[in-house]
Amino acid sequence: MSDETRIYRKRRRAEQEEATRERIAGATAALHETVGPAHTTVKAIAERAGVQRATVYRHFPDDQALFDACTAHYYRSHPMPDPARWAAIPDPGERLRRGLAELYAWYRETEPMVANSIRDMTVFPPGTQAAFQAFFEAAAAALLAGRTERGRARTRVTAAIRHAIGFPAWRSLTELLRDEEAIALMEALVVSSAAAGRGAASPARPR
């Protein structure tokens, strides 16, 4: 056998292995989107991907490896918004509107997957849970950057922004509102939260 033939066969085998990995990752993502991670079994993944269970385990020996591949596969088709782009917008109000617009559009595009993921978050491996949390921490930090509120006003604004970027808030609001109306409402919440404590009466001291 010539060296060229060996190289070709090795490259072909690597391509086939990568294609199998992608089929498994795609099958996992499809099941997560339809039945949810908690109800996704290796047997179901293997059947959907057209492989044996042993093949799934050979390519993905633990949950973290499988979830990483599934997430990467899904995000290639449905990329998450990039908070770093928001941070480049100097005006905090415009930055908030842009961030919420991109985030809410992503929620609308990926609603079944995000809803199932949040519902079944406890079955996610630690690395996937940490990555999910890190995204929302980065989103909140980007939308808070450059704001002038301090003290309790800063705390209220932080709470309002954290609420506004959450999937449950978007889903609840858009039962009745269009996305742009939900964004305007959340923007008003953030603005009003900074002044919410001004002039509030101090609680009476017990006698």
Image: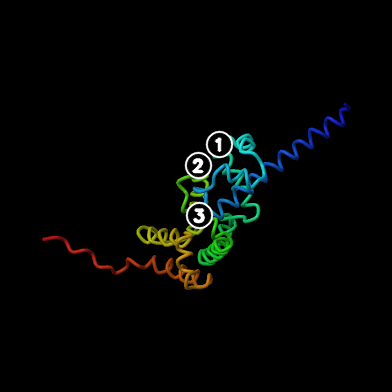
Q: Nearer the viewer, residue 134 or 43?
A: 43
Badge 3: residue crowd in 10 Å (few <14, some 14–19, many ≥20): some
Give the amino acid type for the residue marked by disc 1 in the picture: Asp
The residue tagged 1 is: 62
Q: Which of the marked residues, 1 or 2, is nearer the chain's N terminus? A: 1
Q: Which mark is residue 188?
A: none
Q: Nearer the viewer, residue 100 or 74?
A: 74
Badge 2: residue crowd in 10 Å (few <14, some 14–19, many ≥20): some
Q: Please, what secondary structure does the residue beneath circle 2 have?
A: loop
Q: Which of the marked residues, 3 or 1, is nearer the chain's N terminus? A: 1
Quadrant, the C terminus: bottom left
Q: Please, what secondary structure does the residue beneath circle 3 have?
A: helix
The CA span between labels 3 and 1 is: 21 Å
Q: Which label sits in the foreground, 1 or 2?
A: 1
Q: Please, what secondary structure does the residue beneath circle 1 have?
A: loop
- Check the image and name the residue furthest to the top: 1
What percent of the width, then of the height, locates residue 8? 83, 34
Q: Nearer the viewer, residue 42 or 92?
A: 42
The CA span between labels 1 and 2 is: 9 Å
What percent of the width, then of the height, locates residue 50? 67, 44
Against 55, residue 99 (above or below) is: below
Badge 1: residue crowd in 10 Å (few <14, some 14–19, many ≥20): few
What percent of the width, then of the height, locates residue 5? 86, 31
Q: Is residue 132 left or right of residue 195?
A: right
Query: Mark 1 and 2 residues: CB-CB less than 8 Å, in contact?
Result: yes
Give the amino acid type for the residue marked by disc 2 in the picture: Pro
Q: Nearer the viewer, residue 169 or 40?
A: 40
The residue tagged 2 is: 125
Q: Residue at x 56, y 54 (%)?
A: 33
What percent of the width, then of the height, locates residue 127? 52, 41
